[in-house]
Image (spheres, coloured by chain):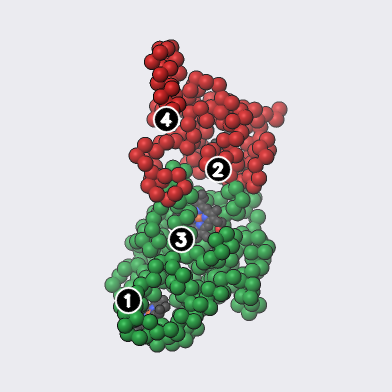
């Protein structure tokens, strides 16, 4: 709606600098493929209240760090028939997982589009002889937080050309599909109306750089796919499952819309 | 359910009343500019019920996108324009068309159709995330649409 344009200024004029030593780019010119759709891209952090934003500035105040620490602990714990831990193959998490969040999702050696959770489970089942973790299970979310933190301050770096292009195109098509009885697409809320309020919710651009996020409302960690599931459900639609091919395609496309921004996960959201 | 049975009984007894049977969502006729000129039910709308429907999430939920100063609902949204003075800007027929399916008035609008049963892409069963039942009811029934229109007609500033 055109009349709402000036309200987009309703965004915090603030800088994110986690622990005072990790500055994060939260505003950037939009990627070329977004011409005519968005001029600039913004982290969801800028649309949150002063108190939520402040919690993300300092790890002592950020409730997600407790979960991240549990993930770090698990990194060194051997599991499964092979008696191996993540550290046995990947070394220190700070080294082994640096930049990994920023390039997710990406194609595996077989040409399938995998999210972070797929890679983790592949290591567990194929390399450790351990059981797969549920997509939204506690240990999985803790591990994805621990891994995301290693990419803080690194620019979004997803590959969308070559063999990734067909997945990206499908994700883009989904982004503009008007689902459900309310006939709303991701773009209806996050492209046409970011900066506006839908009831009490201040709409952001729906970027992924804060993920996984801690939601104060659920007092827990929320994965990217779980957020997608909720947003599609809210259009009075039959939603998709976390981990589905559809959500992995959508994740690639939405991640690419954040090109120019830097990873800040784990974020804090209402 | 009870209401439908009652209506059917009334229609059977008094042939004249049958002319006022609720127009089904599929049968609604829009003019070129998106008006719906005849009442969906033939019964006058109740503005106070309309006000309640407009502020209730499971019903019209209009306040999630519109500021309506006459309603005391908290956290009114601004995805759509303020509705104050709507009756000064629009006729009753146009407002009925907007509530039934605003896409006939505003091409491509994000405002959902309140009296529409499809076609939809992956329709759901309310906000459960599950697939819709085969006979998905519209968000508002015909009388609720008339109630909301009657409420909108009270929104005058001039
Ligand atoms: C026995 C060795 C081994 C163990 C144990 C192991 N991994 Fe891996 N992991 C690998 C290899 C090899 C790859 C590269 C796979 C590929 O490129 O297809 C990999 C890839 C990954 C990736 C994707 C990295 C990228 O650059 O995209 C993640 C994330 C990951 N592992 C996490 C874990 C976690 C978490 C654990 C423990 C729960 C773990 N791994 C245990 C060997 C291991
Ligand atoms: C009916 C409106 C609506 C639709 C449609 C919608 N969302 Fe959302 N979305 C929200 C609201 C409200 C929030 C919470 C506030 C915010 O960050 O925008 C949100 C948050 C998000 C977030 C979290 C952003 C952050 O920084 O925490 C992501 C990611 C997201 N949405 C993606 C999507 C995608 C992808 C789609 C389409 C499949 C979609 N949304 C469709 C309303 C919607
Ligand atoms: C998801 C958002 C949304 C919801 C819910 C919604 N609307 Fe709207 N509405 C809009 C938008 C956006 C417009 C502006 C039309 C356009 O340009 O797209 C609009 C326009 C209107 C207009 C014309 C306003 C004017 O004066 O120009 C009326 C009247 C209206 N809506 C009434 C309602 C009523 C009544 C309800 C609830 C039964 C409702 N709306 C629910 C988004 C919404």
How far is the residue under mark 3 from the one under mark 2?
22 Å
| Residue farthest right in this picture | B158
Compared with residue A256, is residue A81 higher up or lower down, i.e. above or below? below
Q: Which mark is residue A125?
A: 1
How far is the residue under mark 2 from the one under mark 4?
22 Å
Q: Identify the residue shown where x is 56% and y is 25%.
A: B45
Compared with residue A198, is residue A34 higher up or lower down, i.e. above or below? below
Note the chain letter of the red one. B
Q: Earlier in the sequence, mark 3 or mark 1?
A: 1
The picture places residue A178, in percent across and down from the top left corner, at 43, 47
Q: Identify the residue shown where x is 68% and y is 63%.
A: A50
User: According to the image, label 2 marks what residue?
Assistant: B57
- Name the image quarter holding the C terminus of chain A: bottom right
Res B74 quadrant in image: top right
User: According to the image, label 4 marks what residue?
Assistant: B1
Asked if the residue under mark 1 is in contact with the one under mark 4, i.e. CB atoms within 8 Å, the reply is no
Kindly report which numbered mark, 2 or 4, lies closer to the viewer in this rendering: 4
Mark 4 chain: B
Front residue of A134 and B110: A134
User: According to the image, label 3 marks what residue?
Assistant: A226
Front residue of A107 and A132: A132
Is residue A73 found left or right of B84 in the rendered image? left
Mark 2 burial class by Cα count in 10 Å: few <14, some 14-19, many 20+: few
Marks 4, 1 in one chain:
no
Is residue A87 found left or right of A66 in the rendered image? left
Q: Identify the residue shown where x is 60% and y is 54%.
A: A202
Mark 3 chain: A
Q: Within 8 Å: ligand 3 and the Cβ of disc 2?
A: no
How far is the residue under mark 3 from the one under mark 1?
23 Å
Asked if the residue under mark 2 is in contact with the one under mark 1, i.e. CB atoms within 8 Å, the reply is no
Secondary element at image label 3: helix
């Amino acid at each position: 709606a055109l009349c709402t344009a000036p309200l987009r200024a309703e965004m915090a004029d603030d800088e994110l600098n986690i622990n005072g030593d990790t500055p994060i780019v939260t505003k950037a010119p939009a990627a070329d493929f977004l011409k005519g759709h968005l001029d600039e891209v913004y982290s969801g952090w800028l649309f949150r209240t002063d108190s939520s934003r402040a919690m993300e500035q300092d790890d002592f105040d950020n409730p997600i760090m407790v979960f991240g620490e549990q993930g770090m602990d698990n990194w060194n714990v051997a599991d499964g028939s092979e008696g191996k831990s993540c550290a046995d193959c990947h070394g220190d998490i700070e080294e082994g997982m640096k930049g990994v969040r920023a390039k997710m999702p990406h194609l595996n050696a077989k040409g399938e589009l995998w999210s972070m959770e797929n890679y983790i489970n592949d290591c567990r089942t194929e390399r450790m002889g351990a059981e797969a973790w549920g997509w939204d299970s506690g240990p999985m979310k803790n591990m994805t937080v621990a891994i995301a933190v290693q990419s803080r301050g690194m620019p979004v770096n997803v590959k969308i050309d070559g063999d990734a292009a067909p997945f990206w195109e499908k994700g883009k098509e989904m982004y503009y599909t008007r689902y459900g009885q309310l006939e709303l697409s991701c773009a209806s809320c996050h492209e046409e109306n970011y900066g506006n309020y839908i009831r009490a919710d201040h709409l952001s651009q729906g970027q992924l750089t804060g993920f996984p996020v801690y939601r104060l409302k659920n007092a827990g960690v929320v994965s990217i796919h779980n957020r997608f599931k909720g947003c599609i459900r809210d259009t009075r639609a039959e939603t998709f499952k976390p981990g589905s091919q559809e959500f992995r395609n959508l994740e690639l496309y939405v991640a690419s819309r954040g090109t120019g921004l830097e990873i800040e996960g784990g974020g804090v959201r209402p | 359910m009870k209401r439908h049975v009652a209506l059917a009984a009334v229609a059977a007894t008094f042939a004249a009343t049958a002319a006022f049977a609720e127009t089904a969502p599929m049968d609604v006729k829009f003019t070129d500019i998106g008006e719906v000129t005849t009442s969906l039910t033939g019964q006058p709308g109740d503005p106070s019920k309309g006000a309640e429907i407009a502020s209730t999430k499971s019903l019209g939920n209009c306040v999630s996108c519109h500021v309506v100063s006459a309603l005391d609902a908290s956290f009114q949204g601004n995805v759509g324009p303020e509705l104050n003075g709507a009756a000064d800007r629009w006729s009753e027929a146009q407002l009925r068309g907007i509530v039934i399916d605003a896409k006939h008035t505003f091409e491509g609008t994000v405002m959902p159709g309140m009296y529409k049963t499809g076609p939809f892409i992956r329709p759901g069963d309310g906000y459960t995330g599950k697939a819709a039942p085969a006979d998905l009811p519209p968000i508002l029934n015909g009388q609720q649409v008339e109630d909301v229109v009657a409420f909108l007609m009270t929104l005058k500033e001039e």
